[in-house]
Image: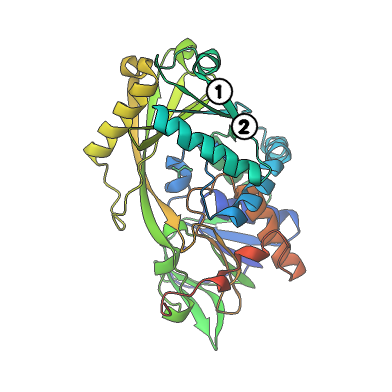
Amino acid sequence: MSAGRAAAPDVLVLGAGVIGLSIAWRCLGRGRSVAVVDPAPGSGASWTAAGMLAPVTELHYGEQPLLALNLASAARYPSFAAELTAATGRDIGYRRTGTVVAAWDGADLAALRDLAAFAATLDQSMQPLTSRELRGLLPGIAPGLPGGLLAADDHQVDNRLLHAALLAAVVGAGGELVAETVARIEVVDGRATGITTADGTVRSAGVLVLAAGAHSGRIAGLPAAARPRVHPVKGQTLRLRMDPDALPPRILRGSVKGSPVYLVPRAGGELVIGASTEEAGFDCTARAGAVYELLRDAQSLLPAVSEAELVEVSTALRPGSPDNAPLLGPSWVDGLILATGHYRNGILLTPITGDGIADLITDGRVPAALAPFAPHRTAPQEVR
Ligand code: GLY
C-alpha cells in the first residue's frame, strides 16, 4: 500500500514470529479484527530455534517463577497442536520424545544430581541414569560417559512447521498480514494510537501488541521511559541430515568440558544442534568458532554426527530480559501491551502467551498465570 491511512483493526500486532502470530490467532478466535506487521515473518528466533519444549532441562537456579509458566505452557501443547492442525490441516511436528541429559565426567554427573535434587524440591522429576541405562536410551551415544538424567516430559515441536501453521491459521481466520517495517509507534497524550510503517502509511488500532522479539526495545516513537529492557542474545544453530536410523530417538543434551550443547532429532533424518549464547549486539553473522564448538561438542556426545551432511547454519537473536523471564501485559503507555523478552523459551511459551494476551485484550484483566510477568516488575530502559 502507498503512503496514506489504512483501516484500523481492533488489534495491531508488531511482529509475526510465533509469539505475535499466536496472539493474533487467539484474538481472531475471540472475534477481534487483527493486523500483524512484519517485513519478514518468522525470519528471526522462530526460524533459528531448535523447538525444544524444555521446562525442566532449561530450569536454572533462581528462575523458579518461570518454571510455573513454562510448565503451564507445556501442558497446553497437546491441545494447542491439535487445534492448530485442525484449523490448518498442517502437522507441527509435536513429538513426545523426552530428553536425556548426558554427563561428560564424574564432576558433571555430580552437578546433574544436584540439579535433579533442586528440581525435586520443585516437584519435578529427573530420573538418574547409569552409564548402561544411558546407552539403552541412546544406543549411538559415545562410549564411556558415566550416566545422566532423563527428563521424560521435555518434548519438542518443529518450530518452522509451527510458524508456518500459525501464519496459515491467522490468514485463514481473516487476519491481515502487513509486510512492512514499523518506522515508529505513534503516542498521543500518553496513549499508543497506532504506527507508521516505513512506506509512510499510518495505521491506527484499538490496541497495539509489541511482540518484536529482540527488536522490541528499539522501535522509535516510544518515550525512553516506556521502552522495554529487552536485549539481543545471539544464538547459532546447525541443521544436519543423517541416516534416520543413526538419529538419537530422543533429545540429547550435555555439557562437554563445560560447553553446553543439545541435539534435537526430527522425524525424517534432520538433526538440529544448538546453540551458542553470545553477547554480540544486533550482529547476526555466523561465527566460525561457534559452528566449530557446536560440531565438536555434538560429535563428542554422538559420534555419528561426523558422518552427517551439514545443511544449514542459522543465526538469530534471543530476546533477553533483565530476569530471563518474559514481559507480558500492559506497558508504561496506555494502549500498548508487551509480549516480548521470552529469551530461551519462546517456542515453549507460545501457547500460554497467545491465550493469555488474547484474554487480557478481550477481558481487560491480566490472567493469573501471566501476573508474575508484568512488565512493571522491571524498569524501562531510561530508569536503571
Ligand atoms: N532454548 C534453547 C536456547 O535458547 O538455546
Please say if 141 is above or below 90. above
Mark 1 and ligand 1: say if the CB distance to the nearest ligand atom is below 8 Å: no
Amino acid found under the numbered disc labelled 1: Leu
Q: Nearer the viewer, residue 155 or 49?
A: 155
Amino acid found under the numbered disc labelled 2: Tyr
Q: Dot 1: few (<14), some (14–19), or many (≥20) neighbours within 10 Å?
A: many
Please say if 135 is above or below 266. above
Can you tell which mark lies on residue 274?
A: none
Please say if 179 is above or below 365. above
Q: Residue at x 46, y 30 (%)?
A: 109
Where is residue 219? Give x, y as percent. 41, 69
Q: Nearer the viewer, residue 13 or 264?
A: 264
Where is residue 5? Give x, y as percent. 52, 73
Please say if 52 is above or below 180. above
Whichever of labels 1 and 2 marks the residue nearer the N terminus, that label is: 2
Q: Residue at x 55, y 48 (%)?
A: 18
Where is residue 257? Give x, y as percent. 32, 33
Q: Residue furthest bottom?
A: 189
Label 1 vs label 2, nearer the camera: 1
Where is residue 326? Give x, y as percent. 54, 59
Q: Name the residue tied to disc 2.
A: 94
Q: Residue at x 65, y 35 (%)?
A: 125
Q: Are marks 1 and 2 in contact (CB under 8 Å)?
A: no
